C-alpha cells in the first residue's frame, strides 16, 4: 500500500501487524521503528484531530512528546495532494505485558514480573504522564489496556488518537472511558448531561482526572489487582448475598471500603492490609479517593506519585517467598493475602458466580470494565437465585402460605354453608383469595427480610416493584385458571354430546 505524509513524501506500507474495529496497523518500509495506523472507516472524522496532534508533536525527530507515547507523528493520505486522509504514522511499541495483565491476581501463566519491577514501571509511568501534563495534554481514557510494559520493563502509552487533546483554543475530547478509571466528576457530569461522556463539558477533562486514574493503577498494582471502589458483599444472616452495586455508582458516591465504612460490604480478602504500607503512600491514596472525591485538585499529581514510589522502591525487602514488601510491615502482607486466597479458592463457588462487569449508568459509548481479579469477582458475584431475593426458602414459604389458605377455605366453605353462615365468597373466589394471600405474604417477606437490607434504600420503589410483580403473577395464574376451566367445560360438553348422540 502506498500513502503520502503531510509533506507529500511517498511511504510504502508493508505487513499488516494487527488491527481492531477502528483500523489496522502496518509496518513501514525503511522505517523499522515506526508503524502506520490506517482507519478502516470514517477516516475523515479523525482528520482534524490527527493533524492537530501532528502539529503539536513537531515531527518524528521532535523531543516535545515523550518517546514512550505512540503519538501521531505524521498524517497520512492516499494522494500527494492530501485530498483523502487515511491515517497516521507513530512509533512502534513492542509489548511484553499490558498494565491490565500486571494487575491480575494470581498472575497469568508465564508472567514473571516482581513487585520491585512493577514499582519501577509505575514510577516511570508517572514521569511519562507528568511530561504530557506539562505540555497541556490529558490522556482521558487512561485504562489498563492502553498502558504497555515494553520488553525491558519500560512503560508506553498506545491509542494516543483517543487522548483528550488540546491544540490552541480547540479541545478534542475523549468520548470513551473504561469504568475502572473514570473520575467521579466525569461520572457526575455524564449523568447530568444525559448523553454520556461525549456530551460532558470540556472543563471536566483535566489533568486531575488523569491523576485519579493513575492513583487507581498504583492502588491496584500494590493491592493484588483490587480496585479501591470495588467491594465484597457481606452475606446476610439468612445466607443470601445482596445484589452488587455497580463500581461507577460506588465511585460517584465516594464509597471506598478501604477508607470508609460502607454498609453491607467489606474489603476483598485478596487485598493486602493497607496498614502494612508506608503512611506516606496511604496518605496519597486518601487524598486521591477521599479528599479528591469532592475536590479533584486535592489528588496527588504524577510528580508526587513518582517521588513516593521511588522512595517506596528503596524500602522494599524480600519475605523469602518471592514477595517484595515494605520493610516497616509487621509481616509480609502478600503472604497473608495468599493465605486468604487459598481459603477462598478452596470453597466451592456457586453456579453463576461469574465476574461482575459494570455498565455505565447513563447513555453513551463505554467499554465494559474488567473485574479486579478472578478471585475477588468470584467472591463478590452472587448466583442469580440469591441475587434475586431470598432464594428457595422465600418461594417455598410463600407458596405454602397460599396452599394453607386454599385448604382452610376449602374446608370452611361447606361447614359454613351447613351452619347457615355466609362468608361473602363462593367457590369461584376460593382460588383467587388463596393466590392473593400468597402474593401479599411474599411481598411482606421480601420487603421485611431482603429489600430493607440492600443499599439502594429506595424502599417505596422496591415495595411497589414487588407488589406489581406479584400482582402480575396472580393475574397470570387467574387467566390460566379461567382458560383451563373453559377448556375443561368444552371437553366435558364434547363428551356429553358424543354420549347422547350415540
Image: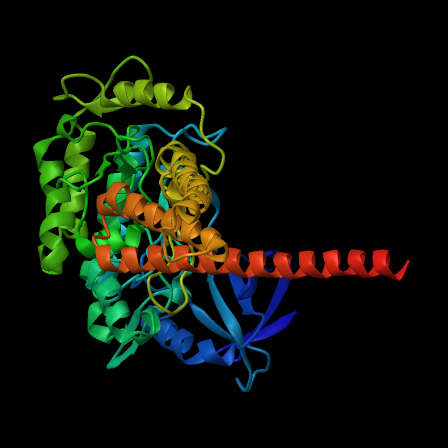
Which residue is located at x 50 percent, y 57 percent? 428
Q: Position of residue 440 (x, y in %)?
A: 33, 50
Residue 143 relative to residue 281: left or right: right
- Whether residue 372 is visible here, answered yes or no, is yes
The relative height of residue 277 versus residue 98 in the rendered view (above or below) is above
Which residue is located at x 41 percent, y 77 percent? 51
- Whether residue 148 is visible here, answered yes or no, is no
**Quadrant of the image containing the N terminus:** bottom right
The one nearer the camera, 354 or 104, is 354
**Quadrant of the image containing the C terminus:** bottom right
To which quarter of the image does residue 158 belong? bottom left
The one nearer the camera, 246 or 291, is 246
To which quarter of the image does residue 240 belong? top left
Q: Position of residue 141 (x, y in %)?
A: 34, 59
Which residue is located at x 23 percent, y 48 percent? 455
The relative height of residue 167 versus residue 102 in the rendered view (above or below) is below
Amino acid at each position: 500500500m502506498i500513502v503520502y505524509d503531510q509533506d507529500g513524501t511517498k511511504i510504502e506500507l508493508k505487513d499488516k501487524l494487527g488491527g481492531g474495529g477502528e483500523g489496522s496497523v502496518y509496518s513501514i518500509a525503511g522505517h523499522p521503528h515506526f508503524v502506520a495506523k490506517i482507519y478502516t472507516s470514517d477516516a475523515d472524522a479523525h482528520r482534524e484531530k490527527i493533524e492537530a496532534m501532528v502539529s503539536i508533536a513537531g515531527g518524528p525527530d521532535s523531543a516535545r512528546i515523550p518517546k514512550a507515547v505512540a503519538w501521531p507523528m505524521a498524517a497520512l493520505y492516499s494522494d500527494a495532494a492530501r485530498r483523502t486522509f487515511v491515517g497516521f504514522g507513530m512509533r512502534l511499541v513492542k509489548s511484553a505485558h499490558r498494565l491490565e495483565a500486571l494487575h491480575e491476581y494470581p498472575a497469568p501463566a508465564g508472567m514473571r514480573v516482581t513487585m520491585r519491577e512493577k514499582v519501577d514501571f509505575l514510577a516511570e509511568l508517572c514521569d511519562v504522564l507528568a511530561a504530557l501534563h506539562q505540555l497541556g495534554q490529558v490522556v482521558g481514557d487512561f485504562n489498563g489496556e492502553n498502558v504497555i510494559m515494553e520488553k525491558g520493563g519500560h512503560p508506553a502509552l498506545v491509542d494516543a488518537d483517543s487522548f483528550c487533546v488540546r491544540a490552541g483554543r480547540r479541545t478534542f475530547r475523549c468520548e470513551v472511558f473504561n469504568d475502572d478509571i473514570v473520575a467521579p466528576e466525569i461520572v457526575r457530569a455524564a449523568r447530568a448531561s444525559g448523553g454520556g461522556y461525549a456530551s460532558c463539558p470540556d472543563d471536566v477533562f483535566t489533568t486531575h482526572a488523569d491523576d485519579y486514574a493513575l492513583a487507581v493503577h498504583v492502588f491496584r498494582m500494590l493491592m493484588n489487582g483490587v480496585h479501591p471502589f470495588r467491594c465484597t458483599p457481606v452475606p446476610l444472616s439468612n445466607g443470601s448475598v445482596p445484589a452488587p452495586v455497580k463500581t461507577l455508582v460506588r465511585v460517584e458516591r465516594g464509597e471506598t471500603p478501604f477508607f470508609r465504612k460502607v454498609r453491607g460490604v467489606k474489603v476483598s480478602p485478596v487485598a493486602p492490609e493497607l496498614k502494612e504500607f508506608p503512611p506516606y503512600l496511604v496518605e496519597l491514596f486518601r487524598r486521591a479517593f477521599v479528599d479528591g472525591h469532592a475536590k479533584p485538585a486535592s489528588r496527588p499529581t504524577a510528580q508526587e506519585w513518582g517521588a513516593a514510589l521511588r522512595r517506596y522502591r528503596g524500602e522494599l525487602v524480600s519475605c523469602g517467598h518471592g514477595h517484595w514488601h515494605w520493610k516497616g510491615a509487621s509481616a509480609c502482607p502478600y503472604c497473608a493475602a495468599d493465605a486468604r486466597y487459598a481459603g477462598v479458592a478452596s470453597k466451592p463457588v456457586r453456579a453463576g458466580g461469574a465476574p461482575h462487569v459494570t455498565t455505565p449508568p447513563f447513555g453513551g459509548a463505554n467499554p465494559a470494565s474488567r473485574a479486579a481479579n478472578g478471585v475477588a469477582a468470584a467472591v463478590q458475584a452472587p448466583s442469580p437465585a440469591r441475587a434475586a431475593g431470598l432464594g428457595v426458602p422465600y418461594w417455598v414459604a410463600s407458596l405454602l402460605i397460599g396452599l394453607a389458605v386454599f385448604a382452610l377455605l376449602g374446608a370452611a366453605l361447606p361447614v359454613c354453608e351447613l351452619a347457615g353462615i355466609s362468608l361473602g365468597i363462593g367457590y369461584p373466589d376460593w382460588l383467587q383469595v388463596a393466590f392473593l394471600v400468597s402474593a401479599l405474604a411474599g411481598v411482606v417477606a421480601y420487603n421485611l427480610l431482603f429489600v430493607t437490607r440492600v443499599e439502594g434504600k429506595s424502599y417505596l420503589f422496591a415495595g411497589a416493584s414487588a407488589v406489581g410483580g406479584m400482582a402480575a403473577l396472580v393475574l397470570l395464574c387467574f387467566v390460566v385458571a379461567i382458560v383451563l376451566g373453559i377448556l375443561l367445560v368444552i371437553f366435558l360438553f364434547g363428551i356429553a354430546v358424543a354420549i347422547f348422540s350415540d
